[in-house]
Image: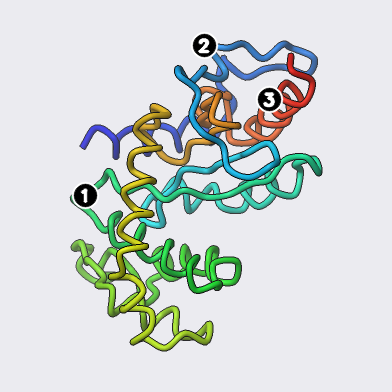
Amino acid sequence: MLKHLVFLLTGLVAASASAQTAAPGQQWQAGKHYFLIEPPQAAAGDKIDVVEVFSYGCPACNSFAPLADKLKAALPANAAMRYVPASFNTAESWPLFQRAFFTAQALGIIDKSHNATFTAVWSNGPLSIRDAASGRMIKPTIEDAAKFYAQYGVSPEDFVATANSFAINTNMKRADAWIKATGVDSTPTIVVNGKYRITGLSAGSWENVIPLVQFLVQKETTGG
């Protein structure tokens, strides 16, 4: 699958700085290090909106998770980071993980469960997508997810009921539409204020994502 190849390529490029890497003091360039979103899309909240488009089923997103935490901590007070789960890899469990994210968010447990869900998927945990012995693909169910999230004080019955609700279905459709409108076709991708799109490949390395996002937040702050 093309998108899956993009994920792997992005991860490989992120392992070492590429020729695109911006040296200290070098100007970040639109069309090279980041891309303009035309037309700009709606941003959430009253702060500069920094979004990671991701999936728990994406190996590059799992690798990026610690840097995502650093990025969130490195943002100035006038910016806020949030997460939008993608579902476009339908051959795997991405739609299920998208549903689980929005359900955990609706139930008020996402801050506790977010990073732990990556571990549950990628460390042979209860939401694993590969059989450790055979390597064959596994597709967890919403009931499997409900059992995992029960550790955060939500009954499996309530989790499943919420997961199948109109509100969650609506959130999923809105996320899919927003991701398409912003031109995101690989994960992880960072979108700044609905105007700028960044990947590890465009930034030159995963580490470069943080100063590049800071540059774009400052650009939005000053109106530059």
Give the class, few, some or many, for how many residues have Cα within 10 Å of label 1's Cα (few <14, many ≥20). Answer: few
Q: Depth check: give the residue in front, 126 or 37.
A: 37
Image marks 1 and 3: residues in contact by CB distance under 8 Å: no
Instruction: Name the mark on residue 23.
Output: none
Quadrant holding the C terminus: top right
Q: Is residue 43 left or right of residue 2?
A: right
Mark 1–mark 2 distance (CA, rounded to whole Å): 29 Å
Mark 3–mark 2 distance (CA, rounded to whole Å): 13 Å
**Residue at horizontal 29 percent and vertical 64 percent from the top:** 129
Give the class, few, some or many, for how many residues have Cα within 10 Å of label 3's Cα (few <14, many ≥20). Answer: many
Image marks 1 and 2: residues in contact by CB distance under 8 Å: no
x, y (%) of residue 149? 44, 79
Mark 1: which amino acid?
A: Thr
Callout 1 secondary element: loop
Q: Is residue 93 left or right of residue 48?
A: left
Mark 3: which amino acid?
A: Leu
Count of numbered circles on the image: 3
Q: Which residue is mark 2?
A: 31
Instruction: Name the mark on residue 216.
Output: 3
For the residues carrying marks 3 and 2, which lies nearer the camera in this image? Answer: 3
Callout 3 secondary element: helix
Quadrant holding the N terminus: top left
**Residue at horizontal 24 percent and vertical 32 percent from the top:** 2
x, y (%) of residue 117? 46, 67
Mark 1–mark 3 distance (CA, rounded to whole Å): 32 Å
Q: Which residue is mark 1?
A: 90
x, y (%) of residue 176? 33, 43
Q: Depth check: give the residue in front, 138 or 102.
A: 102
